[in-house]
Amino acid sequence: MSEQEKDAAVIEEDNNLKKDNIEGEAGSDKPEDSRTEAASDGSAQASSAGEQADAEEGADERMEELRRQAEENYQRYLRAQADFDNFRRRTRQEKEEFAKYASLNLIEQLLPVVDNFERAIESSKGTKDFDALVKGLEMTFRQLDQVLQQEGLKPIEAVGQPFNPEYHQAVMQVESEEYEEGIVVEELQKGYVLKEKVIRPSMVKVSM
């Protein structure tokens, strides 16, 4: 082999060695890149899992808070309902009590009148003095009338008044020279007004 052929063989061998080294270096870089990418993916997954765990924990806390508020509101509702039931029961009892003893004040005022009636009757039995009995009854009647007036009871004016169906109940029509047509000429039963309410109309005769 000539010197030139030897030199060419050496150069070719050196080139082959360099090529092998380059391919080896390129091959060795690929696993390192894969490891880097794998590590990056793992870190991202770990971060995402942590964020999800934090979100779930926050949702649980919010749910627990809502449950607590709902329970408090329910308890307040129950207390309010109980208070309202008690108030309604007390109101009903007070109304029943008021209706039961509504006439108490009037009865207390009438008791002295009853006492005077009893005295007049007992006195007349012993003395047979009918004039004194009548006088006593008249005094007792005036006392009774005063009590009723204090309670707002007033007699309805009838005789000589124009007939008014709101206050008068006509039971008969009669001819009259004294009164013109439609005038009350006689009262058969007295009528009464309690404050502004007619509790009994007067029973009357009316001119025609």
Image: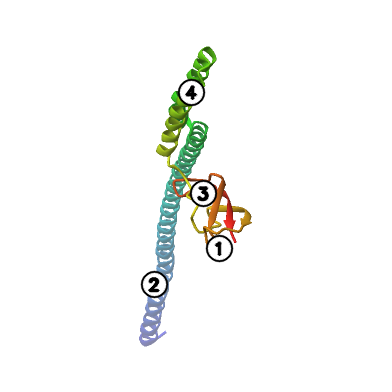
Q: What x and y, as percent, mark residue 134?
A: 49, 26
Q: What residue type is labelled 2?
A: Asn
Label 3 crowd (10 A; few <14 / some 14-19 / many >=20) = some
SS label for mark 2: helix
Residue pushed farthest top?
126
Identity, as a three-letter code, of the amino acid under mark 4? Asp
Rendered position, 157 above or below 81: below
Quote the CA–CA distance across marks 4 and 1.
Answer: 42 Å
Which of the two labelled residues, at mark 1 and mark 3, occupies the earlier sequence position?
1
Q: Distance between the residues labelled 3 and 4?
A: 36 Å
> Residue at label 2?
21
Q: Which residue is the site of mark 4?
A: 131
Q: Name the residue under label 3.
A: 198
Instruction: Please identify, in this view, whether the residue under mark 3 or under mark 2 is nearer the observer.
Output: 3
Tell which circle, 4 or 1, labels the residue nearer the N-terminal end: 4
Colour mapping used in the image: rainbow
